Amino acid sequence: MKQHVTILLCDDHTLFREGIKAIFKDHVSIQIVGEAGNGRMAVSKAHHLHPDLVLMDIAMPDLTGFEATRRILKAAPKTKVLILTMYEEEEVITRCLNAGAAGYVLKDAPRSDLIHAIDVVQRGGQYLSSRALKKVVRQHVESSRSKETGYERLSDREREVLKLLADGLSPKEIAGLLVLSVKTVDSHKTNMMRKLDLHDRSEVIKYAIQHSLIRLPSMKPKRAAGRSSSTLAVAREQ
């Protein structure tokens, strides 16, 4: 952390701001240069004080912490915004990060976490408290899963059944080939069609062709009378 980090403290609770100032009292490298009790005041003071870092609550009156963060960073891109809040919902965390916040600390975190977060953010990094990080990772994983294609959600057996059905085999023939019972094959077939939203064999075949799971039967040209074999070979190449 540089010799002095100037901070604008933004929270609508006076007692909370007093508590934060008490935490920083013993840290000579941190200097509180201003306070704001609402979002609009936060934007105005950030514009006039040019702090290195803004500690921003989300639930601010007059102007939300999300909007205040956006406006501050739009006017002063080099200013860092560190969210300090009680909210830990995934949507709230994501909105703050999308607004440009460089960090997210929960109000019940140890004071050492807050000091560390300020150091990380001031050095150009990003900081998420451990609980917030878990929430973001979980949301990312769930979002990735929701973007999976229907085919990716199929089991290996369901993919086999899909291809064999599209190739024209009956459930009984598939059962013999895969050494399964017909009932098991029917179960795989039902699950596969439900996941892909298919309703009959023709739709299964169409899906398989569209996704290159099977090849269309090759159309061999009829041998024309009077053509030599060499002429026919050329025609095929063309």
Image (cartoon, helix red, strand yellow):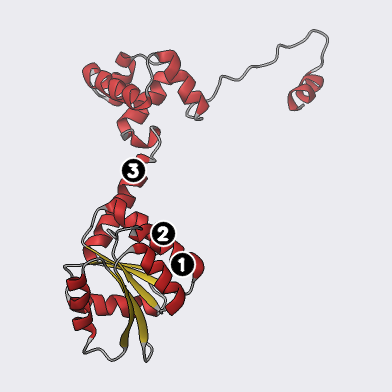
* Residue located beneath label 1 in the image: 73
Look at the numbered disc 2 and give the secondary structure of its residue.
Answer: helix
Q: CA distance from mark 2 to mark 3?
A: 25 Å
Q: For the point 35% across and 46% down, which residue is it?
A: 143
* Residue located beneath label 3 in the image: 145
* Residue located beneath label 2 in the image: 99
Is there any visible trace of residue 95 in the rendered image? yes
Q: CA distance from mark 2 to mark 1?
A: 9 Å
Is there any visible trace of residue 50 in the rendered image? no
Marks 3 and 1, the one that precedes in the sequence: 1
Quadrant including the C terminus: top right
Q: Is residue 109 left or right of residue 116?
A: left
Look at the numbered disc 1 and give the secondary structure of its residue.
Answer: helix
Q: CA distance from mark 3 to mark 1?
A: 33 Å
Residue 199, placed above or below residue 140: above
State if disc 1 and disc 2 touch (CB < 8 Å): yes
Instruction: List x then y, in percent, for residue 200.
Output: 39, 13
Res 146 quadrant in image: top left
Marks 2 and 3, the one that precedes in the sequence: 2
Instruction: List x then y, in percent, for residue 193.
Output: 34, 22
Res 228 quadrant in image: top right
Q: For the point 70% across and 15% down, which residue is it?
A: 221
Marks 2 and 1, the one that precedes in the sequence: 1
In depth, the one of 149 and 100 nearer the eye is 100
Amino acid residing under circle 1: Leu
In depth, the one of 226 and 158 nearer the eye is 158
Residue 90, placed above or below residue 163: below
Quadrant including the N terminus: bottom left
Instruction: List x then y, in percent, for residue 230.
Output: 80, 22
Amino acid residing under circle 2: Ala
